[in-house]
Amino acid sequence: MNSNGKNVLLVGVGGQGTILASRVLSEGLLAFGYDVKMSEIHGMAQRGGSVSTHVRYGEKVFSPVISKGEADILVAFEKMEALRWLPYIAPDGMLIVNNHEIFPMPVILGQAEYPSQLEKTLSEAVPRCVVIEAAKEAKEIGDPRVMNMVLLGAVVKKLGLDETSWEETLKACVPSAAFQVNVLAFEKGMNLAG
């Protein structure tokens, strides 16, 4: 953690809800009175391309961009994205990774192989590695799309921001028809993070 605040880097594949999770996190942090800067980068394809969002918060934040070695928490919505973004984790940083695989086109076409034993590789690279079955949990809740909120709940817990209710923030950011299932997913993520 830097003296000015915290850096949270969320990475995934288009269509996983990475950007929505980042927006909910940013809105919640603003509601808590933090200065927040957010920057999002979309891959070449809306669905299937790489997506990353930088969220920096603290008393005063000047830049939205997180440099290599500065992320206090790297949140990976997909395991290979975790591997790709490892250089961004701070020496004492934490990795929260969704135990989920989305094969990129070269793997689908048989031109490459998806790395084996990624969980082992990641946990050896980052001592503070938390693996969450977010896709499985979301499916059990009844909506696979809320996987992002399971991960966000875990992030909020690990950041120590779980003392205050996030329901108003969720209500402002998600469609009303999906509000209740998003709250359930968020709470499930907080519980899974311990």
Image: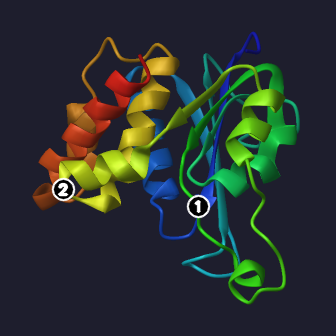
Could you classify mark 1 by the number of other residues whose Cα lies within 10 Å: few (under 14), some (14-19), or many (20 or more)? some
- Residue visible at 71% across and 83% down in the picture: 105
Q: Seen from this angle, which residue lies furthest bottom?
A: 109
| 83 or 187: nearer the viewer | 83
Could you classify mark 2 by the number of other residues whose Cα lies within 10 Å: few (under 14), some (14-19), or many (20 or more)? few
- Residue visible at 63% across and 82% down in the picture: 45
Q: Seen from this angle, which residue lies furthest front?
A: 117
Q: Which image quadrant: the N terminus? A: top right
In which image quadrant can residue 164 be found? top left
Residue at disc 1, secondary structure: loop
Lateral position of residue 122 relative to residue 38, left or right: right
Q: Position of residue 122 (x, y in %)?
A: 75, 37
Q: Position of residue 154 (x, y in %)?
A: 44, 29
Give the residue at mark 2.
Answer: 142
Lateral position of residue 68 relative to residue 82, left or right: right
- Residue visible at 49% across and 29% down in the picture: 155
| 173 or 121: nearer the viewer | 121
Figure check: 116 above or below 127: below
- Could one spot residue 41 in this view of the protein? no
> How far apart are labels 2 and 1 at the CA level?
20 Å
Q: Which mark is residue 101?
A: 1
Lateral position of residue 110 relative to residue 54, left or right: right
Q: Position of residue 157 (x, y in %)?
A: 43, 20
Q: Which mark is residue 171?
A: none
- Residue visible at 61% across and 57% down in the picture: 12
In which image quadrant can residue 131 be found? top right
Type of the residue with mark 1: Glu
